[in-house]
Image: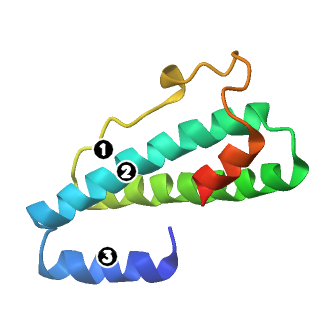
Amino acid sequence: MNENIKSEMQKHQQNQRLNAAELGYLWAQYLGDTLYVCVLGYFLSVVKDAEIKELLKKAHQISQTHVDELTELFSLEKNPIPVGFGEQDVNKGVPALFDDIFMAIYVN
């Protein structure tokens, strides 16, 4: 986790716990990012265009970083880790469902 974020979280923890609205927002972010990791992972398995593949790799990396940071945040706050999307929710063995251009638009 980014050291600045970690430092801010430690300051926050000294004063108060996350409230319900903050937790709800973080849960929604976690679910969204786990979905993006799955979708982008599938896209990476079928994309043909090299430039779009690089874009997808970067987006996948960002989403995975968010998931990792949120997981650490939930642990620091002693809250349960949400059950997000995972490999069991994706069938990467199927042919491409979308054109490469759609994948680039999806990332945008």
Q: Front-most of 102 and 91? A: 102
Few, some or many residues within 10 Å of mark 3 (<14, 14–19, 20+): some
Q: Determine whether 24 is above or below 97 in the image.
A: below
Residue 81, disc:
1
Q: Residue furthest right?
A: 50
Few, some or many residues within 10 Å of mark 2 (<14, 14–19, 20+): many
Whichever of callouts 1 and 3 sits on the residue coming sooner in the sequence is 3
Q: Determine whether 103 is above or below 68 in the image.
A: above
Q: Is residue 41 left or right of residue 57?
A: left
Whichever of callouts 2 and 1 sits on the residue coming sooner in the sequence is 2
Few, some or many residues within 10 Å of mark 1 (<14, 14–19, 20+): some
Q: What element carries label 1?
A: loop
Question: Looking at the figure, which quarter contains the C terminus?
Answer: bottom right
Q: What element carries label 2?
A: helix
Query: What x and y, as percent, mark residue 90?
Result: 55, 24
The residue pinned by badge 3 equals: 9
Q: Which amino acid does label 1 sit on?
A: Ile
Q: Determine whether 42 is above or below 102 in the image.
A: above
Give residue 59's quadrant in the image.
Answer: bottom right
Q: How far is the residue under mark 2 from the one under mark 3?
A: 17 Å
